[in-house]
Amino acid sequence: MREILDELRAWNEGGEQIALATVVETWGSSPRPLGSRMAVTRSGKMAGSVSNGCIEGAVFEEAQKVMKSGEAKIAAFGVADDVAFEVGLACGGHIEVFVQPLDAVQKKLIGMLEKDEPATLRTNLVTGESQLVEGIPPGTELARRDGDWFIESFRRPAHLVIVGAIHIAIPLHRLAKVMGYRVTVIDARAKFATRERFPEATSCSFPGPTRDWASSRLTDRRTW
């Protein structure tokens, strides 16, 4: 979900009608794990992936049908090994994708993820009902199917703190952001720890200009 947050926020603010497609079951070869998502708008925009391109076209059509009907559904896709080879795929497999209209529960989840708040989403694959709970339960954090329910846990992203806003920290913070980290850059030199140099950082902090760096407290630092 996090990889398509920017698109979901922009589309929602623009009044787009949106459907979410989520991988809820796989057998055999599957290029994307459980919980992988793809978002589709009624106007034809797409974001995310459920199979790295193999079935995205078909899922797009199913999403359009779901937005028109307002009813969630499971779409199943499968191909045998020999057929897969003939059409240029690496191997066969079977994928089930749950397609549903974006509702108030998912919108609340989007808001929580944007604030890096942990949450657990439970979706009934028969009725389409969604339940959102703050925090995550003990046990595995991997998306899983439990009978008619699909359960996803969203932990706060890991936090990388980079001390020293030097030149190699610039590509490092960009790579960390792509990998899903929250990034904080700390440097005593305010002109180094800037938004212009570190646009992907969650925050940058530095001490006040009249304070000694070694004796400054965290609460005395300026942060953007």
Image (tube, helix red, strand yellow):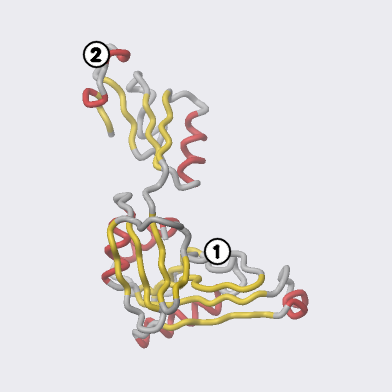
Determine whether, in the image, residue 52 is placed left or right of residue 114: right
Residue 51 in picture, x, y percent from top left? 58, 68
Determine whether, in the image, residue 83 is placed left or right of residue 194: right
Q: Residue at x 71, y 71 (%)?
A: 89
Q: Residue at x 37, y 22 (%)?
A: 187
Residue 13 visible in the shown view: no
Q: Nearer the viewer, mark 1 or mark 2?
A: 1
Residue 123 in picture, x, y percent from top left? 37, 73
Residue 173 visible in the shown view: yes
Point out the residue furthest to the front here.
Answer: 139
Point out the residue furthest to the bottom here.
Answer: 69
Graded by Cα atoms within 10 Å as few (under 14), some (14 to 19) or many (20 or more), the crowding at tag 2 reads: few
Q: Give the amino acid type for the residue marked by disc 2 in the picture.
A: Arg
Q: Secondary structure at mark 2?
A: loop
Label 1 and label 2: CA atoms lie apart by 50 Å
Q: For the image shown, how many numbered marks are present on the structure? A: 2
Quadrant that contains the N terminus: bottom left
Q: Residue at x 28, y 69 (%)?
A: 105
Q: Give the amino acid type for the residue marked by disc 1 in the picture.
A: Pro
Q: Give the labeled residue for mark 2.
A: 211
| Tag 1 and tag 2, C-beta contact below 8 Å | no
Residue 206 in picture, x, y percent from top left? 31, 23
Residue 54 in picture, x, y percent from top left? 62, 72
Q: Give the labeled residue for mark 1.
A: 33
Give the numbered dot on residue 42. none
Q: Secondary structure at mark 1?
A: loop
Q: Nearer the viewer, residue 199 or 73?
A: 73
| As drawn, 122 above or below 176 | below
Q: Residue at x 36, y 85 (%)?
A: 71
Q: Earlier in the sequence, mark 1 or mark 2?
A: 1
| As drawn, 69 above or below 109 | below
